[in-house]
Amino acid sequence: MAKYDVAIIGGGILGTSISYWLSSLFDIHVCVIDKESDVGMHASSRNTGVIHSPFYLDPQKKGILAKSAFLSYELWKTLAEKRELPWKRVGTLEVALDEDQHKTLEKYMRWGVNNGIPQSDLELLDRNEVLKKEPNVNCHSAIFCKRDAVADYGRFTRQLKTESEKNGTTFLLNHEVISIEKGPKINLKNNTNITANLIINCAGGNSLDVAKMFGLAQEYSDLHFRGEYWIAQEKYTNLVKTNIYSVTKFKDFPFLDPHWIIRIDGRSEVGPNAVPVPSPETYSGYIGNAETLISKLSEIITGNAKKLLSNPDFISLISKEWLSSISKTVMIDRVKQFIPKIRSSFFSERGTAGIRTPLITPTGEFLPDVIELENEISFNILNYNSPGATGAPAYSAYVVKKLENRGFLDYAHSAKDSIWNFEKIVTQT
């Protein structure tokens, strides 16, 4: 039976980032367990690739994610430069369609500064100023954040795996966790098992299930929402040359209205919506595995999610999301509100779908921020959603420092060459 000091469940961008920090800072035996054939196969690769600036995040409710996203911008840029990975600064326009939404933009401007963004990187533009920048965008007003960039988070994750392996980390790919026993002992699907002094749960859309293996988070449930995209035909790629987001209409729910996205490979896409699906891997169709569907329906009927079904705003949202999944025209028409020249005929191919898994509280509300739950053998990171990929390097450094301060990492320090400065980051988080 293999024994490790730390076992990380989940080889996404967060788990791989944590493995990098641990292996670069300590004389420690670390493994990362993932059921797929490579790291970053799910949410870490199935996203927009936008390096978000956190001007739209409430520093009171989403302070950890906001700070991590701000600090990680330069970290990702440094990695891209040092390892010759793609990186392109494109900027983002967050548009308001009326005066009420304009007031939200004014609030975002304050939040952005509170979250660390230099005022010089944020501009509040009126309609005419927006038209000068993007002639095909029609709105009441907009925030222009010039620092926003696009990259490939999947490649970032794979590069961090390479860096972590150089430091001695073992990646147990094609290994699925099926149960956890006292010891702690992790039982894997291929009839093998390992032991570890500490288990870190970074299992993304499955993180709640893993936490419950430790007897934690029993009061929470989750729902899975698929975000779908449509790819603009090449001749329409330059209709708009900046990322275009709009102020969300459903402020109590963790979803964005569809927007115009510039990809690192030059494609332009519209999306996402938020379609309920039964599992964190139902990337197409609506039913998925029958057993999984029945289990999820039972959980919804008996758990916290059933309280959402009595919320008329939630029902209205879900109805619109279903329609936008079934009908390309419905999806594109939502973007037509601020890009009037756009037509559904400009799009003929679906993009890569991703899935977000927000947690639901016992009162039937979506949990607004990431939560961390621990016991004597585990540290569990739950509800780590967007802009989680952006914030992964800084947030993972914060986690490692927290674990060290808590006494979980009583190992000798081992200075190794590092692409990032750990102490500089943790003094700012």
Image (cartoon, helix red, strand yellow):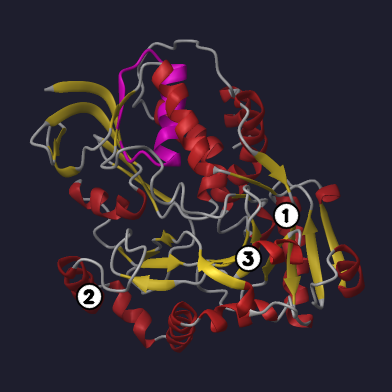
Tell me the quarter of the picture where residue 36 sits: top left
Residue 361: percent from left, percent from top: 36, 67
Q: Secondary structure at mark 1?
A: helix
Identity of the residue drawn at 39% across and 11% down:
412
Q: Is residue 359 magenta?
A: no
Residue 105: percent from left, percent from top: 75, 68
Mark number, residue 112: 1
Q: Residues within 10 Å of mark 1 (few under 14, many from 20)?
A: many
| Amino acid of disc 2 | Leu
Is the Cβ of the residue at disc 3 closer than 8 Å to that at disc 1?
no
Residue that badge 2 annotates:
297
| Amino acid of disc 3 | Gln
Q: Is residue 158 left or right of residue 338?
A: left
State which quarter of the image contains the C terminus: top right
Mark 3 or 2, closer to the camera: 3
The span shown in magenta is 9-32
Q: Secondary structure at mark 2?
A: helix
Q: Is residue 348 left or right of residue 295?
A: right
Of labels 3 and 2, earlier in sequence is 3
Residue 84: percent from left, percent from top: 63, 28
Q: Is residue 357 left or right of residue 172?
A: right
Of labels 3 and 1, earlier in sequence is 1
Of labels 2 and 1, earlier in sequence is 1
Q: CA distance from mark 3 to mark 1?
A: 34 Å
Q: Secondary structure at mark 3?
A: loop
Q: Is residue 26 magenta?
A: yes
Mark number, residue 233: 3
The reply to whether residue 187 is visible in this rendering is yes
